[in-house]
Image (spheres, rainbow, N blue to C red):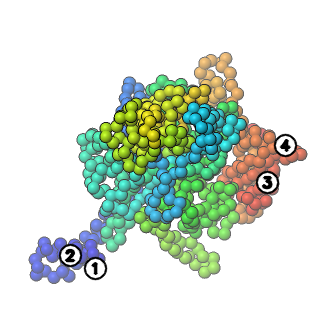
Amino acid sequence: MTTSKCMLSLLFLGLLSTDLDARDIQPDVDKLVNDIGELARQLMLQQLFIEERIRSDGNSGVKQIRGTHKGTRAYFGDTFNMGSMMSIHDHTNYDRTIGMGEFNAVMNGVEFRTRHNDYKLRMPSENSTDFNRLQDVPFPEVPPSVKAKHSVPDQIKEMREYFRAFKEQNASIRHDYRDYFKPVLCYLEGAWTTDTKTLSEPFHSDRHFLDASSWFDLLEKVRFTSYTGGKSNFENYSFLPTTITDVVDGRPVYAQWNYRIVCHPIRNQGVSLSSLSLIDDLGVRMARRFTYEKAYSQRTARFRINPRSYNQYNSTLLAAQRQDLEYTGVELLDSVMSEIPGKDNYYHTLQDNTFGVEEDTMMNFGKSEQNSAYYHRLTDSKIGNSQANHVSYKGFSDENLFVAETTQPRVAPMSVLSCAFNDTLKDVSCSNTTVRYSYALPLEIIWMTPLYKWNPYDIPFFTDNKVPPKNGRVGGTNATSAYNGTSQSYYYYTPIDFFKSNEVGRDPADTAKDVVGVLDKHGHVKLVKPSGTRIVLPEIEGIGKIRTRYPVAPSHHEGSPMYKEMDALKEMVLDIPKNLKFFESPPFGSKTKQAYNHDDNLRHFTTTFTHNTPPGLHQHDVYVDSRDWWALNHNQMVTVITTNDNEHTHTLQIQRDAHDHNRFNILSCDNAPRCWDGHSNGLLQVTE
């Protein structure tokens, strides 16, 4: 008899006469246990229904910040943005703290709300596979040419040249500037965990924590604030749902959703300032009265990682450039996310062969096994002995669902019985597969600079945060009131003369003082500014302001059909001359002329027909956008993915023929000299 049956039997025996034989009520107990199991399964199916509904409503992405704005138009109200994207702000007096408030997010159909985040520059452990083990992201070094200067003014002058090289992305100013300006991608990671009894803090913050004694206590506090319309004044509550993942012997098995924000030093050398383009969140611009150009430097700015790391049609390298219009397959973001491990941390290898399907990575043209222990959203799969390629996203319609498999027992498992026909045995064989997965979303790219470690006044650093303000010191300008050195939360190193202006775009949530006095090792007062992470650096003499935080989080709503229609309409009306041909009637009369639109130049090709069986008679369409067309015309090789025909696609590397410029050759097909199904090595251009 199961434990649940025993407990129910004892309950019945306590309620009924002690003379009653337990065997007389055992059928009732069995029925009650069965009914409880059925109810638990119905709750599980109801949760699945809710998640499936959310999945079809939009993509994984951020959804809402705490509302603090309203007005006479709907766009005055907060979405995932308004005062700042995801409520980001500055805590530059901390060495590693990145200011970010509360927000709602959706990940793989799970909707949840974070606490006030204020996460730290920390990354998964490189030396341990322990669950959620982190280590500090290493700060960039100070350029040797800066440290070689003997005076602080000379160090300032040399350091400014490195910042000039970074802003202009110009190696001729300082050839090695990339060694000292390092991008990190900070991301949101979520998973269903088995920690259902003891509350687990998702990640450390210098300023915030989950203010509850248990998951149940946290849920009750969220229910109370939702019922009353109130809030935690310290913003330390978060809504993290609980679900039923299985029913065993009539007993429900629970899982607890939890999340964390972690960072990863980007290794891909293709990531630069020109890899980022500004997303035009028009409602925010209208409410704040920002021009497109002004929006770039504001805290409300949201960016996209360009698919191919650059934008051909803009002469500037700054991220204020507009986005190109194109279909995309494998993007630069896919490459960056493939560097990030799941819950097993770095250097772990897993292969997901669920349903007997071998998954290959789309990196390197998709011809090596997908390491499912790292985050990915796009796979190239083969079924059984078939040579056909099936390129697909991990989600049914979720463009942003990055997943990673793990072996961590604290991540809730999911099992499935998979059956397939076995050619050798000439029979159906079945196997049970159990997997554990976590999910990730990119949040922001942060460019780390030499300011974290640049200490030209040789100010002492104390691990004890109580030392700098001890004895009533407040960062004043005399020896009595100045801070006694620095620490993790009194992180002031940068000489005041390095910057020309005060801090940029102050927010009530910002915590740093603009200028403080700090004692050096000799007891002399030095006037310095904070050295932690800023959204935008104060103006530098002769260089201007430099942005170092670039929010790149996708929006949940961008996956909805309504948003897609509105996005198309926005594109039309914001540049009418370029999109005139899409109007049913000319908006300004018949004299309006269609402007040149390079995005219209989509070239259409097809492969040759093949008669091989399998897979049968077919050909594929190939579309080359204006960017790739430019590359082909300059004798460069281009990678494209064909349309899906006869249940497969091909990844092609194509190039214009060196002798016949009207011919376009397939150099490789699925990383092989020829396509497995017999297409010839030439493309046919379609004139329409």
Quadrant for residue 611, please give it: bottom right
Q: Position of residue 182 (x, y in %)?
A: 58, 45
Picture layout, residue 539 above or below residue 331: above
Q: Would you name the residue on which mark 1 appears?
A: 1
Question: What is the quadrant of the C terminus in the image?
Answer: top right
Q: Earlier in the sequence, mark 4 or mark 1?
A: 1
Marks 2/1: CA distance? Answer: 10 Å
Marks 2/3: CA distance? Answer: 73 Å
**Which of these two is toward me, 495 or 520?**
520
Marks 2 & 1, CB-CB < 8 Å contact: yes
> Circle 1 — which element?
loop
Q: Would you name the residue on which mark 2 appears?
A: 9
Marks 4/2: CA distance? Answer: 84 Å
Q: Position of residue 618 (x, y in %)?
A: 73, 55
| Relative horizontal placement of residue 513, taking residue 182 as reference (left or right) | left
Q: Residue at x 45, y 46 (%)?
A: 461
Badge 4: few (under 14), some or many (20 or more) residues near its Cα, within 10 Å? few
**Amino acid at dot 1:** Met
Residue 662: give its label: 4
Question: What is the quadrant of the N terminus in the image?
Answer: bottom left
